[in-house]
Image: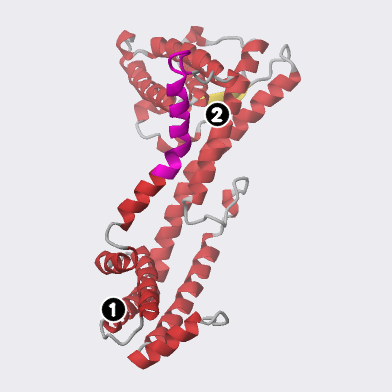
Amino acid sequence: MDNTQLNFFDQLYSKKENIEAANKALLVPTIKNNTIDSKVRAAYNKKLNQIQQLKNNIVTLGEKQQQYFNQFNSSIEEPLNKLSDLKIKLINKLDEHFYKKSFCEHELVSISEWIITTCNEVERYGSNVIEIREKYEDFLYGEDSEEDDSDLFDLIFNEDYQKEDEKNNQSAGHKSKKVKPQSKEEELLETDFSKLYKKLAKDLHPDLEQDVSVRDEKEVLMKKLTEARRNKDFYQLLSIQNSLNHFVNDSKEDIKEDQLSRWDKILDAQLKLLKKQYQEKIDGSIFAGRLKINQDLGLLKINELIQEEEKYIRRSINIAILDLELIRTVKSTKEYLREMDNPFFLI
């Protein structure tokens, strides 16, 4: 085994000098054993590279998002505060108009929806307008709307399961409920993961180590082993196994082709899960819609994104100033609401 790759987690978080060797030893080796079929080796090595890259990307995405927020706060703080102040003035003015008894029911609904939408925008900027937002949500939907929606959601969501339960209950007297069988990958993961975990836990047990410096290294690896078990991270188990070569001479094993094939299938399942997790992190980040799962994060230009955001904020400031002017009086507000109802109305 050679051509090793340094585990990114350990590059990033290595801190103590006395455990530096253990951290650097957390490598995942690719296979160059010519006795193993070249296609099996290539598939296994490719998955190692893909998993390592995804793990790197997940960490880097968080760093990029923090970088974005740091630059955002430093360069756009002033216009953002101005926009937030204008939006709050808009909310307060609409709230004032609402109680003047000069609007029909349709107009009151439009004002309420406008206030709620604007409150949601302002809350994203960090201002607290929850009380006024909830007041108008109660007006539109009723005080128990959230609870009712939840009950309705539960009813719809669980409908299929309730039907299935009823079906199972009816046939309970004849046969027991069928349990979904494990997939091949799940069986492999459970067997090989458990076997490898137990071996590593035995080899790394710090209480069995007399050398203090080695004991410290083993304690670090044991924490990572526990983390790998909790996350079902087979890739990390392999990296920990390889790290044993640093101070356990008999820990090296020749991997057979059938074992490598099994591990390849387990890594394939882990790779699919990592792709899903990474996509979810992208979708939940500031880069949603701007970043693809296979895109090089090094090409993500934070400055350009900040400039786009600044243009949007300055445009929004101009719109908010115009809105405030157009709702200055009840009469002008009624006229503006009529224009907004017009399907050809554009801001």
Left or right of residue 38, residue 180 in this image: left
Please tell me how crowded label 2 is: few (under 14), some (14-19), or many (20+) other residues with Cα within 10 Å.
many
Which is more N-terminal, label 1 or label 2? 1
Give how far across and how far down residue 124 sits, in percent: 37, 63
Identity, as a three-letter code, of the amino acid under mark 1: Asp
How much space separates mark 2 and mark 1, taking CA atoms? 53 Å
Given the image, on which type of amino acid does mark 2 rest?
A: Gln
- Is residue 298 or residue 174 the one in the foreground? 174
Q: Residue at x 35, y 49 (%)?
A: 150
Residue drawn where x is 41% and y is 28% of the image: 20
Seen in the picture, residue 345 relative to 273 is either above or below; the reply is below
Q: Which residue is mark 2?
A: 270
Residue in front for this viewpoint, 174 or 85: 174
Relative to 34, does residue 88 appear above or below in the rendering? below
Residue positioned 38% across, 23% down in the render: 226
Res 15 quadrant in image: top left
The colour scheme used here is secondary structure
Q: Look at the image and tell me whether residue 65 can be seen.
A: yes
Check disc 1 and report its element: helix, strand or loop.
helix
In the rendered image, the vertical position of residue 330 relative to residue 222, given as above or below = below
Vertical side of 216 occupied by 280: above or below: below
3 is within the stretch colored magenta: no
Q: Position of residue 166 (x, y in %)?
A: 44, 28
Q: Quadrant of residue 210?
A: top left
Q: Is residue 326 something one can see in this rendering? A: no
Q: Which residue is under mark 1?
A: 95
The region drawn magenta spans: 155-177
Q: Nearer the viewer, mark 2 or mark 1?
A: 1
Residue 133 position, x and y percent, is 30, 67
Main SS of the magenta part reads helix
Q: Is residue 171 magenta?
A: yes
Task: Report the front residue among 337 and 275.
Answer: 337
